[in-house]
Image (cartoon, rainbow, N blue to C red):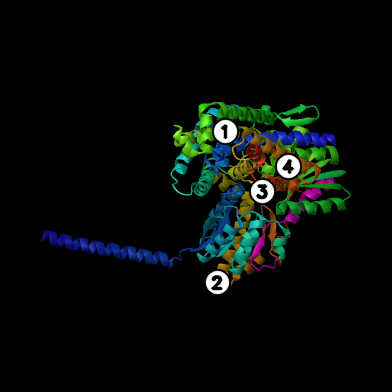
Amino acid sequence: MVRKTSAIASATLALALMAGVTGATAQDASKTEPKTFTIGAHMPLTGSLARSGQAFNEGMQVAVKLCNAAAPKYQVKIDLIDDESTPAKAVSAVEKLASDGSVAIIGGYGSNIIGPASDASDKLGKVYITAGAVSDELTKRGLKTFFRINNNAGYQRGIATLIGDLKPEKVSIIASTKEAPALLAEGLEKDLAAKGIKVTVHKFDPAITDFKPIINKIKLQDKPDIIMMSAYENDYVGIIRAAKVLKPNVKLLVGTWSLATPKMYTEFPDLMNNVVGTSFLPFPVEVKSAEGKTFADTYKQMYNKDIEYLSTLSFVETMVLCDALFRAADNGTLEKGGLADEMRKTDRDSLLGRIQFDATGDNPNFSLSMGQHRNGKIILVSPKSAANGEIVYPGVPW
Amino acid sequence: MTELILQALFSGVLIGGVYALVALGLALAFGAMRIINLAHGELVLLAAYMAYLVESRTGLDPYFAIPLALVVVGAASWALFLLVDKIQDHRELNSLILTFAIGIILTNAILLIFASDMRTTSSPALQDAVSLGDVFAMRGEIIAFVLSVVLMGVLWWWLKSSWYGRAVRAVSSNRNAARLMGINPARIETVSFLVAGALAAFAGVALYTMSVVQPATGHALTVKAFIITVLAGVGSIPGVFLGAVLLGVTEALTVTLASSALQELAGMVLFLLVLFLLPNGLFGARARRG
């Protein structure tokens, strides 16, 4: 009898619990569970561009964390594929991400990779955003789904303004034959020549490791006031090292992306002092906007380091995409191709300044400051409106 | 102009010396076993990262990493040989695929362990400029060149005069005949791979002291080493040195007299030219004629 009563009691309790759970679940569901969107991303996590890809991934992950924290109605999930620094892998990554249900694609690094990958994305009708491809050719294709936040023109403007203000007689440009640095060098050559500066360009194969023959040519034949490097991090190290050995009589070394970063100073302190590169933040980091401060704090928390150049670019592109995605979801246009329209309506401030997209998907407002390495700090020295210190000129690392 | 050409020649010879050091191990394995070790560049890279590890953790000069590099790269080379030795059929072709795959695994292992950042020596002594008259170089480059010449001499002497060296040449020449002479080919091949690994260890440490390394560097090193081995002719140690210096000087002169964008192209043109005119390489052909 006792056993029977106990069995009935247990069954009643179980039923009550089940009913409670079901009821609770139904109640939760009625509280509108956040809708989850998957954003696809392909980054060069391995291969020759792995360093850039990993920095990009970090910025993107921080942005997703902040997007999710700020939007109670929606959640974003990243589906990331390593494109191994190759265009073919990037194209197949885009196709896979689209077939797996990604609503948009965040592109990786390198104009030669982004080009075919964004073509594939356009054919599949997916919005594609990048911060790692500055070639002018990309925005001449008339793609309706392609967007980027930075471009060659912005880098060119930043460097040309600095060099123009310094009024040198001669400038030697050392440029990698890779697409983006080569285009930048061509644009700068025209800009500087228009300012009456004599420019010599030395293009080099990216496989080069010994830059002494080039620097010696510059030292003995060009005799410039400024050496400008349109290249990548490993090239900068080789070029500056060769210059340190041969000591050409120049007044300044100027470079482009990924040069005026705290990381470069930490890793190569003997090579970086007084070298100038494109930048948007001084170091120690002085972020004024609330979004920037949150980004810097979260980044520090997640990766135990200060924000860096490439991570900041990918942070901004991901935030822009999230904003547009949530707007399209709010308007109920996401399923009808409304994301591209919302991207075109973008008009927001960011760590890179104001972000808008023109008809080609380019950000016409993109412009960078120039930062000078100064004993572990990075001082913004140009343009004057953004400067937080005077440039050391003449100033070389040796 | 003379000053420019002198500097180009000097830089070319120095970089050629380092190319030779990188190519030696590949040339030895190719000469002794007809195995093109496509993971050789990654073994060199592994040694370079050992140098980074020792320098960054202890603050010692990177050359103090040589014992550690010898152990780590020697072990990796031995493991590689054990895998290659398992191949029963079409050894030359299958070993090519196997070593290529191992190269990819090594690259990604290095990427996982050491991250994708660039690494190079921070030793001011190795980066200091050294001038010889009107020409300049980094001290690290001079040391690497001297090391290359010394190792080349030691290897040449070992192959020519030691029992093991002669056995390597015998196995390379005719495996079955060598066996009939009481030589154990498997043992000799193990020794060849271990010596190739040791050479890769020295090359990697030297490379770290004068250049920038990152996980993707290994493949480029293998390609360069392969070009030099073919330029030299199979099994020729002096040929490796001369082929490497020829390549280095051609590249440097191309930069000086033409365009730096043509440097790699000039190297490949030289490679094709030698293949076309001397299909057995610079020294392979001479030996056969002799």
Residue A20 position within the rendered picture, expressed as x and y whole percent measured from the top left: 32, 63
Badge 3 sits on which subunit? A
Q: Are marks 2 and 1 in contact (CB under 8 Å)?
A: no
Q: Are marks 1 and 4 in contact (CB under 8 Å)?
A: no
Crowding at mark 3 (Cα within 10 Å: few <14, some 14-19, many 20+):
few
Q: CA distance from mark 3 to mark 2?
A: 37 Å
Between B106 and A364, the one lying in front of the other is B106
Crowding at mark 1 (Cα within 10 Å: few <14, some 14-19, many 20+):
many
**Rendering quarter of residue B142:** top right
- Helix, strand, or loop for circle 4? helix
Q: Amino acid at mark 3?
A: Lys
Residue A331 position within the rendered picture, expressed as x and y whole percent measured from the top left: 57, 71
- Helix, strand, or loop for circle 1? helix
Question: Are tags 1 and 3 found on a single chain?
Answer: no
Residue A134 highlighted magenta (yes or no)? no
Quadrant position of the C terminus of chain A in the picture: top right
Residue B284 position within the rendered picture, expressed as x and y whole percent measured from the top left: 63, 39
Badge 4 sits on which subunit? B
Q: Are marks 1 and 3 in contact (CB under 8 Å)?
A: no
| Mark closer to the chain start, 1 or 4 | 1
Residue to which mark 2 is pinned = A335
Q: Which residues are magenta?
A: A141-166
Between B8 and B92, the one lying in front of the other is B92
Q: Are marks 3 and 2 in contact (CB under 8 Å)?
A: no
Q: Amino acid at mark 4?
A: Glu
Q: CA distance from mark 2 to mark 1?
A: 61 Å
Q: Which mark is residue A288?
A: 3
Q: CA distance from mark 1 to mark 3?
A: 54 Å
Question: Are tags 1 and 4 found on a single chain?
Answer: yes
Q: Is residue A186 left or right of residue B197?
A: right
- Helix, strand, or loop for circle 3? loop
Residue to which mark 1 is pinned = B199
